[in-house]
Amino acid sequence: MPNSNKTYISELKNNVGGEVTLSGWLYQARSSGKIQFLIVRDGTGLCQCVVEKGKIANELFEQLKHLGQESSLTITGTVRAEERSVGGYELAVTGAEIISPAVDYPITPKSHGIDFLLKNRHLHLRSQRQWCIGKIRHTVIDAIRRFFNDNGFTLIDTPIFTAAAGEEEQTLFEADYFGTPMYLTQTGQLHLEAAAMSFGKVYCFGPTFRAEKSKTRRHLTEFWMVEPEVAFIDLAGLLELAENFVSFIVTHVLQNNKGELETLGADIDTLEKTKPPFYRLTYTEAVDILTGRKTQDFLAEQLKELQSQKQQTESKIAELEKQQAGQLKQWQRDKIAAELIELRADLAETNTKIENNPKHAKLAAEFQWGKDLGGSDETIISQMHDKPVFVTHYPKKAKAFYMKTDRDNDKVVLNFDLLAPAGFGEIIGGSAREDDYDLLVKRIAEYGLDVENYLWYLDLRKYGSVPHGGFGLGVERTIAWLTGEKHIRQCIAFPRMMDKVYI
Ligand code: 4AD
Ligand code: MG
């Protein structure tokens, strides 16, 4: 082994012309007799390592040729810039050492179904897609902390065991707490309100639990939520805080993860447009849009597009199936098989959308003022916008007990949801909080909640009550929007879902 500098793939740009050693895993390999192209990953990126016969010992050349995917190794070589190579640099290999050979790694470059990949999440985390999402998640979380820390907020760690519902009672996970029922937290908000009366501007950030009986692409039973809470703020102030916050996250991700976004095929142009002010609609305006002509036209147009998409995908599939029947090398066969799996998944998705389109159109047309916006309603509103949209002033009946009643219209509350554009839907929910003692007591009773559980919360309205409010941003939903991932289960390393927890 030549005595070289150990480095990381992310540092190759500083070592052009020099000889370096990388430690990593074999991601992919291609060989054509006298030359092998090994794609190695080391946690910081991918690098093509070119092994030429005659440049290293014959025995090693043969060993590398038969090395299985995900074998661990160190590899030494001279760095050269190569635009066409993944990452822009490659290694002209001068030596290598196999650390631990892997045989029959179960996840091959051929595509696998999602169920298989979730069962193998402990390994699938090594895939380029999961790696890119993980890197972006890291940046999102860093941006969240930075934004609040740099804007005078104090971090408060709120409890995970709670005695009462913060959101809806039906979605509590019960735990046996030494013989007494306790619940896993749905929100840190109530405790955070207490802290806001001490520190003024606070936030909490942690895992949140919802026993929601929803198997949709937007629901996890365990997800991460960041919640700011501010004393002396009104609804307009909250919207401004939320749009600055979300824009900050987007900017931070664009600055740090352009490469990952590109690899994932994210809509970078639209993300670049994510700057304040965002769109603002009242719930009543949103209902007018949903039940109006424009929405029906929009959905009809969408149906046409989906049908032509379906035709295109079907003819691509037919074409590949024809190719499959011919004479092919194994790698060509694998490539076609992988493409077919993806195209068939696309087709299934397009078919579902085609099936749902008229149902969603009917739901929208018949939407009655007073209901909460459903998933499909949010999707429609969000698809009709190219920047995030605030929807404010929901009917009181559709929302949580703690939301402040609008003093000018007691049928609605001073709340908002923030819908991400392009159909991604709600990423933030928030509100001004009811700060009047008597009104809050009434609301608690109306919701059939036990006032005994909320006496401490009512104290906050007894001793120096102030207008205040806050919101919660779901981390996985935000990442799904930024990365263009269809399902939020891909946006957390080990997802927990209603129907299944894999590993
Ligand atoms: O709208 P939600 O339920 O609001 C609250 O919990 C408030 N107490 C927050 C506050 O005002 N401090 O949830 C906030 C966000 C949603 O907009 C969504 O992004 C995310 O949390 N969320 C979920 N994410 C994944 N899976 C679920 N089951 C989620 N439920 C909510
Ligand atoms: Mg909500």
Image: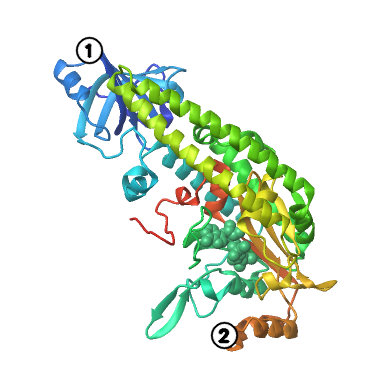
On the image, the x and y values in percent for residue 90 come to: 38, 20
Looking at the rendered image, the quarter that the N terminus falls into is top left
Looking at the rendered image, the quarter that the C terminus falls into is bottom left
Q: Which marked residue is nearer to the observer: mark 1 or mark 2?
A: 2
Where is ligand 2, by quadrant? bottom right
Residue 227 visible to an observer of this rendering: no
Q: Which mark is residue 437?
A: none
Nearest the camera: 4 or 310? 310
In the rendered structure, which disc, 1 or 2, sits on the residue that comes first in sequence?
1
Residue at point 35%, 43% (across, down): 124
Residue at point 36%, 26% (across, down): 335
Is label 2 in a helix, a strand or a loop? helix
Ligand 1 under 8 Å from disc 1 Cβ:
no
Q: Which residue is mark 2?
A: 453
On the image, the x and y values in percent for residue 478 come to: 57, 50
Q: Where 20 falls versus 210 (above or below)?
A: above
In the picture as drawn, the residue positioned furthest to the bottom comes out as 452
Query: Which amino acid, by three-letter code, is at mark 1?
Result: Lys
Query: Which amino acid, by three-letter code, is at mark 2?
Result: Asn
In the picture as drawn, the residue positioned furthest to the left comes out as 59
> How far apart are the two marked residues, 1 and 2, measured between alpha carbons?
75 Å
Residue at point 57%, 73% (across, down): 168
Nearest the camera: 223 or 372? 372
Q: Residues within 10 Å of mark 1 (few under 14, many from 20)?
A: some
